Image (spheres, rainbow, N blue to C red):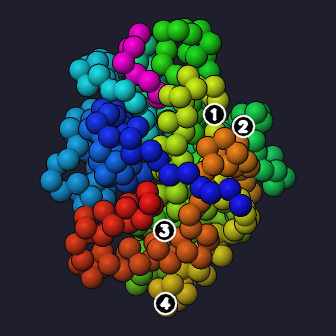
Amino acid sequence: MVTARRPDTAFWSGRTVLLTGHTGFKGAWLARMLRQLGSRVVGLSLPPSTEPALFTMLLPDKQVDHHLGDIRDAERVRAVIRSARPSVVFHLAAQALVPAGYDDPAGTFATNVDGSIHIMEAMRGCSNIEAAVLVTTDKVYHNDNTGLRFREADRLGGKDPYSASKAAAEVAVACWRESFGAQMPPMATARAGNVIGGGDFAPTRLVPDIVRALVQGESLVLRYPDATRPWQHVLDVLVGYLLLAEQTAATRGSIPAMNFAPDAPADIRVRDVIAAFEQAFQSRLPWTQAVDPPPEAATLALDPRLAMETLRWRPRLDHQQMIESTAAWYAAWRRGDDMARRCEADVADALA
């Protein structure tokens, strides 16, 4: 069996990393990981969108050079990137919720497409940038609900505003790579399956909805209980992003896009996730199905072989372990534990 790679501390230590969306769920965890690897982290983001917020728990001592700004503001993006002079850029800032895309389709496209273009234009001509990873989603593929495990060369699409905007961002990245060539740093896009883990408090996402239902003693309302998704733990995905950045720097962007998803099983239903959390929390989670929810794909699965073969990336936690880890995080939070210390330990385990 191939030994899974871990991020190279020698690569990250002392490097300046520009991270957009650092106040969000994945962004806050990635900022913490980069700090523990020895990087200087410069963050550009809107303020945390939830209360409580993982960002304020993870980084209470202001270990990030924190810049507020909207990626739809091209001049603000350019100013922060040019002044920071990063050697690596991670672009995570996005409108990342499918239901919110239906509520504000124009705003979703502006953030996810125009915002990505602003990042690329700000990086254009910056010789100091060795690698840029622009994060999209597993939903960029043209999904006909056959259960096909999508590979990176498969047709892009998107039937809802969020998915379509992320597919359009992928097209924009390919366009800038081809059109401006040597003016652009080595770039890759990362397409990850549905992530779960401690510290997610966003609306209309499954795990935060489960936690809120437990705390408030209410029933869950599920949009599509039989929909299947490639669930995986957030720290496993972020290790993949770090490895992709290292590979992109080393090979000058030889691989333009990469999937990150569990190898198996890839067909876990929403109702199965609920049942696993019931077992982990030892509490029943009653639920009802939403009436006339907006359309979403019934099945979704990614093929992660490229990441596994090229990066030697492997998810550290299986389905049961990631549920137990996530439930334990929220149990600690509800007890009032020192969450910064807990998150530091979780990151150390993920990087080991």
Indicate the amino acid at tag 3. Answer: Val
- Distance from disc 4 to disc 3, alpha carbons, whole Å, reads 14 Å
- Measured as percent of width and height from the top left, residue 320 is found at 59, 76
Q: Is residue 333 left or right of residue 126?
A: left
Mark 1 residue element: strand
Tell me which label, 1 or 3, sits earlier in the chain: 3
Marks 2/1 in contact by CB < 8 Å: the verdict is yes
Task: Classify residue 306 by image quadrant.
Answer: top right
- Distance from disc 4 to disc 2, alpha carbons, whole Å, reads 40 Å
Instruction: Tell which of 47 and 262 is nearer to you.
Output: 262
Instruction: Tell which of 35 and 227 is nearer to you.
Output: 35
Foreground label between 3 and 2? 2
Indicate the amino acid at tag 1. Answer: Ala
Residue 170, compared with residue 236, is above or below; it is: above
Look at the image and say whether residue 330 sits in the magenta stretch. Answer: no
- Measured as percent of width and height from the top left, residue 263 is found at 71, 59
Dot 4 alpha-carbon crowd within 10 angstroms: few under 14, some 14 to 19, many 20 or more = few
Residue 304, compared with residue 189, is above or below; it is: below
In the drawing, what numbered circle is on residue 152?
2
Instruction: Tell which of 200 and 41 is nearer to you.
Output: 41
- Distance from disc 1 to disc 3, alpha carbons, whole Å, reads 28 Å
**Magenta residues, dominant SS class:** loop
Residue underneath mark 4: 283
The magenta span reads 125-132
Residue 217, compared with residue 110, is above or below; it is: below
- Distance from disc 4 to disc 1, alpha carbons, whole Å, reads 41 Å
In the drawing, what numbered circle is on residue 257?
1
In the drawing, what numbered circle is on residue 207?
3
Foreground label between 1 and 3? 1
- Distance from disc 3 to disc 2, alpha carbons, whole Å, reads 27 Å
Q: Is residue 128 left or right of residue 183?
A: left
